[in-house]
Image (cartoon, helix red, strand yellow):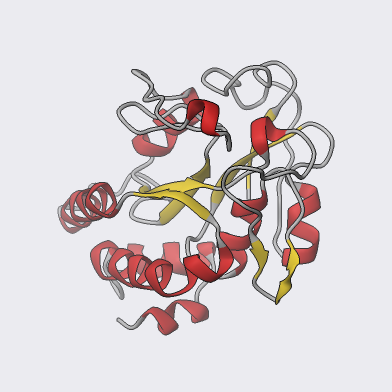
Amino acid sequence: MHDRDLDGFTLATLSRAIAAREVSPAEVTEACLARIERLAPHLNSFITVLPERALADARRAEAEIRRGERRGPLHGVPVAIKDIFATRGIRTTCGSRVLRDWVPEEDATVVRRLAEAGSVLLGKLNMSEFAYGAVHPDFGPPRNPWNLDRFTGGSSSGSGAAVAASLCFGSLGTDTGGSIRGPDAPSRNLGMEPNFRRVSPAGVLPPNMYDEQSRPQ
C-alpha cells in the first residue's frame, strides 16, 4: 500500500476494510508511517513518532483479527494522541520544553482504553504549551494541511493537522474553551464533545486535569 492510498479512507471505512480483511493493520500502519515521514515535517504535527510501537501494535492486531478475535471498530486502526495525555514509557511534554524529558510511569485512562480497543498508536501530537491559548514557543506551530501558510488553531493543533492530512485516522484531544473545536473547523475535521466526565480525565496533565475534557477527533 502506498501512503497516497490512505486518502481514500475515513476512520469508519478503514475500520470496515480491516474487519473484512481487505487491508491489513500492518500495511496501513506502514503507509501511515511513510506518510508521516513525508508530510509531518511540513505540518509540524508530531512531537514524538513511535514507529516500533506502532508496528508492534499493528502486527498484534493483525494476528488477533486473523484468529477471529476482533475487539471492535478501533481494532487495528492507526491513531495518534495529543501530547497532554500521560503515556507509560513514552515522553509526554504538554507542548513545553519544561517537560521535554518527562516519561510517565502510567498511561492516562483514555490511552489505556485505546490500547484495550486494539488501536495502533503512531505517536504524540503537537499542541499549544500546556493547552493555553495558541502559543507554541518550544515546538513551533502546526500548519493547516489545506494552506501551509496558515495555523490550525489551538490547543489540539497537531491533532487537527494530523487527522486532516490522513497521517492518522483519529486522535484524542482535550477541550475547555474550543481546543478541539477550534482546530477542527479550519482543518475540516469532525470533533466530538461528550458530556463532562463522560471520558475520564485521569492522566491528563495538570493544570488541565479537571478543566480539560478528553475527546476524540
Up-down relation of residue 175 to residue 104 (above or below): below
Residue 25 position within the rendered picture, expressed as x and y whole percent measured from the top left: 29, 62
Residue 129 position within the rendered picture, expressed as x and y whole percent measured from the top left: 66, 36
Is residue 27 shown left or right of residue 215?
Answer: left
Up-down relation of residue 183 to residue 21 (above or below): above
Residue 73 position within the rendered picture, expressed as x and y whole percent measured from the top left: 44, 52
Quadrant of residue 173 in the image? top right
Up-down relation of residue 37 to residue 154 (above or below): below
Residue at (41, 75) in percent of width and height: 38
Residue 171 position within the rendered picture, expressed as x and y whole percent measured from the top left: 55, 49
Is residue 100 shown left or right of residue 127?
Answer: left
Q: Which of 23 and 187 lies nearest the eye of the viewer? A: 187
Quarter placement of the N terminus: bottom left
Q: Which of 63 and 205 lies nearest the eye of the viewer? A: 205
Residue 214 visible: no
Residue at (42, 83) in percent of width and height: 5
Is residue 102 shown left or right of residue 110?
Answer: left
Up-down relation of residue 32 to residue 61 (above or below): below
Quadrant of residue 152 in the image? bottom right
Q: Which of 50 and 18 lies nearest the eye of the viewer? A: 50
Is residue 112 shown left or right of residue 150?
Answer: left
**How many numbered discs sit on the rendered protein?**
0
Q: Which of 206 and 75 lies nearest the eye of the viewer? A: 206
Residue at (80, 51) in percent of width and height: 182
Residue 36 visible: yes
